[in-house]
Image (spheres, grey):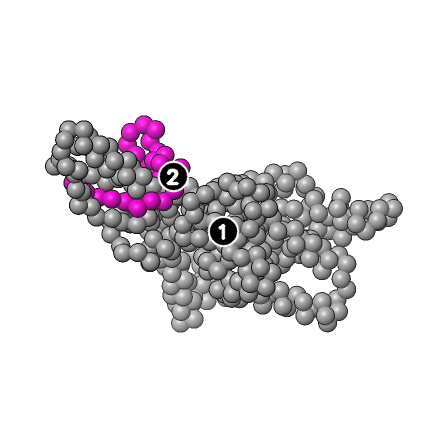
Amino acid sequence: MPAPVPNHPFVTRSSRGRLIEGAVFWLMRLATYFVLVCGLCVLGDIFLKGGRTVFQAEFPYVNVPFLTQAPETLYVFEHEGQKMQLGDRDFRAFREAATAKAKAAGQPAPQFRTESYVYSAGGIWPCIVGTVLLVVGSMSIALILGVASAIYLNEYAKDTPGVRAIRLAILNLAGVPSIVFGLFGFGLFVIFLDWNVSLLAGWFTLAFMVLPVVITASEEALKAVPKGFREGSLALGATKWQTIRKNVLPYALPGILTSSILGIARVAGETAPIMFTAAYVVRDKLPWEVEKVSDFFFQGVMALPYHIYVVSSKIPQNEYTARVQYGTAFVFLFIVAVIALSSILLRNHLRRRYQW
């Protein structure tokens, strides 16, 4: 192959502009890698330290009490030369047994010099239940309202100044801080509607917070469906709603589920809205332990993000609270990943089923 001619017009020549372009390219590339490395370091730290709390070396290799019990106060004390760590229930039972044993032997009741650490024993089962209920309930409401709004805006509404203003308002709502939605939910649902701090108030507050994302993504998914599907259905005598239900929605579902994945990631990690509307620091009973069915909706719950916030910032920090923090964060990320993965798998299944 002959060597390129130096004066050929298509020969690459070095210039100041090309050097600057190459420098900017490598700067952006290094910045991207830096962000990825930082994210991997954070996730690696959580999985490494949280895994020590969730998993154990002996069978069943999972810390079952941490995943199935409620948070308790940890008592640390010495007994017969051994340092012991017991939760509140176990400590009370141990103290009663030691007192009864000493009384039977005619000896004075033993005195335990204990150090207590709040929320550092037991587990996070009520927090797991509350988080799953909040995510599932709020996303169900958001998808129903969001898809209905997207269908109206894309299929029925005309391109008038009022409709354009509504779309602009939806885009603006997507950028409103979550604390504002929390105050809105507190004022409307907790105080005005007198729902108090409850699951129902948390559901609607989180649903309204993620609604702009769901509406926007659902409308784009509906727009992506070819117009020929609508025209062919209408030409065969189908009504407008039959066309939407049979020939538009099934093909738009993968895109709608994409919006649900984005919504899950935001809803699950929010602390401020549920702090005002749905979350309790401690709750003894699980949500289904109620006398009436209606009480299920009008009760507060514990939640993983709020529990992390309380354990990380509202109590004295020590090695025992750090263990709970990382373990809770590990379980929280795992639950969000499982819910999001379920949506992704369903979306991929629908994509394979409805292709055009």
Q: Amino acid at mark 1?
A: Gly
Residue 56, image quadrant: top left
Label 1 crowding class (10 Å Cα cut-off): few <14, some 14-19, many 20+? many
Q: CA distance from mark 2 to mark 1?
A: 18 Å
Q: Nearer the viewer, residue 96 or 200?
A: 96
113, above or below 274, in the image? above
Q: Nearer the viewer, residue 273 or 252?
A: 273
Q: Amino acid at mark 2?
A: Gln
Residue 134 drawn at (x, y percent): 52, 49
Q: Quick check: can you spot residue 238?
A: yes
Say which residue label 1 marks: 300
Quarter of the image with the C terminus in it: top right
Q: Quick check: can you spot residue 50?
A: no
Left or right: residue 25 compared with residue 205? left
Residue 92, image quadrant: top left
Residue 82 on the magenta segment: no
What SS does tag 1 mark? loop
Magenta segment: 53-78
At a point 87% along the width and 46% down the height, the residue shown is 237
Say which residue label 2 marks: 69
At a point 35% along the width and 36% down the height, the residue shown is 65
Left or right: residue 289 compared with residue 100? right
Q: Nearer the viewer, residue 258 or 232?
A: 258
Residue 126 drawn at (x, y percent): 43, 43
Residue 69 on the magenta segment: yes
The disc, 2 or 1, on the residue closer to the chain's N-terminal end is: 2
At a point 38% along the width and 61% down the height, the residue shown is 31
